[in-house]
Image (spheres, rainbow, N blue to C red):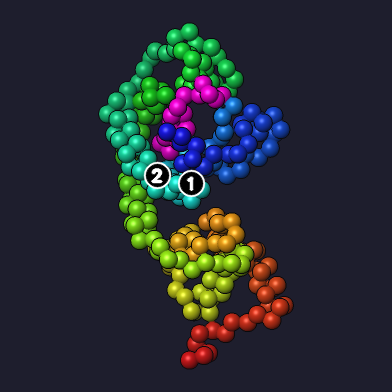
Amino acid sequence: MNYKEIFAINNTPYNKLKKDKVNKGSKYQLDNYDYHEPELIDDFYLKYFLRELLVEMDILDVEEFLEYHYDQSSNQESFLKILKYKILPKIDEVIKNAQCSMSEGGYYDEIRLGDDFIKTENVILKPMYEDTLLYHIVDLKNLHEDIKVRKTFISEFIERNSNLIGNQITNKLIWSGKPSHLAYFVGQLIKENYIKAPVKNDGEINHHELSRSILNSFDFDQKVPTIETLRKYSNMDSEKFSSLDERFANSGFYLPNSGILG
């Protein structure tokens, strides 16, 4: 399976990023190692994603990490299936088999490559993403309970978003203008009490869920916007919203509060 279509992977190869010393982009984006193909091990990006999810990031970033990859995925339904049928069972396997290893390891006729990759038996892999080292780290750092909590976060994420996919509207309205303008208008409708926005536990607007609702309610003549784009232009506290607000006001746009009209 080509996991590159499922996860958010930088378009620029890592060796070029490293050479040019440019910013890699989002902290949740996976680096691009396609220059090792066709010998790169088939499930490399799945193992890479799992390592980031279980070991590399703070547990408080897990949900945002999942949301980022879900939003950027070209096949969100497959992303949820991979979480359910690949990642969750793998977590159980990691917990079950976690144990410290004093062996230095090594691979048959391995050839060391740059950036901690090796070539062995006609495939290229990164040992830090392989099962043995993952078992070792989980046991050494006593991460068993931590990973169980992460599994709960993942399960809840799957359930929540599976319900959204199941309830998606099939006959959507088609937006012909700029997606940023649609997001702005929705923000205005919320501001003037025509629409109730989804809120978080603290009562603040959940801009991520609002943006997802916009995306699920419209088709677009132009390029389909990202959640991040919609979030920037629908958030009344953002610079993007304020800039558009000024431009629309200068063009004579005015939306009265719903209470004024009675």
Find residue 229 and report its horizontal and vertical position in percent.
Answer: 58, 58
Instruction: Indicate left or right for 233 with 120 as reference.
Output: right
When asked about the image quadrant of residue 234, the answer is bottom right
Mark 2 vs 1: CB contact within 8 A: yes
Q: What residue type is labelled 1?
A: Ser
Q: What residue type is labelled 2?
A: Ser
Q: In this view, does 228 lie above or below 197?
A: above
Image quadrant for the N terminus? top left
When asked about the image quadrant of residue 144, the answer is top left
Region rendered in magenta: 36-55
Q: Give the Cα distance between marks 2 and 1.
A: 9 Å
Find residue 3 and report its horizontal and vertical position in percent.
Answer: 46, 36
Q: Mark 1 points at which residue?
A: 73
Q: Mark 2 points at which residue?
A: 78
Find residue 135 and report its horizontal and vertical position in percent.
Answer: 36, 25
When asked about the image quadrant of residue 37, the answer is top right
Residue appearing at x 50%, y 24% in the figure: 40
Q: In this view, does 183 lie above or below 52?
A: below
Residue appearing at x 68%, y 67% in the figure: 243
Residue appearing at x 52%, y 67% in the figure: 174
Depth check: give the residue in front, 81 or 220: 220
Q: Is residue 94 visible?
A: yes
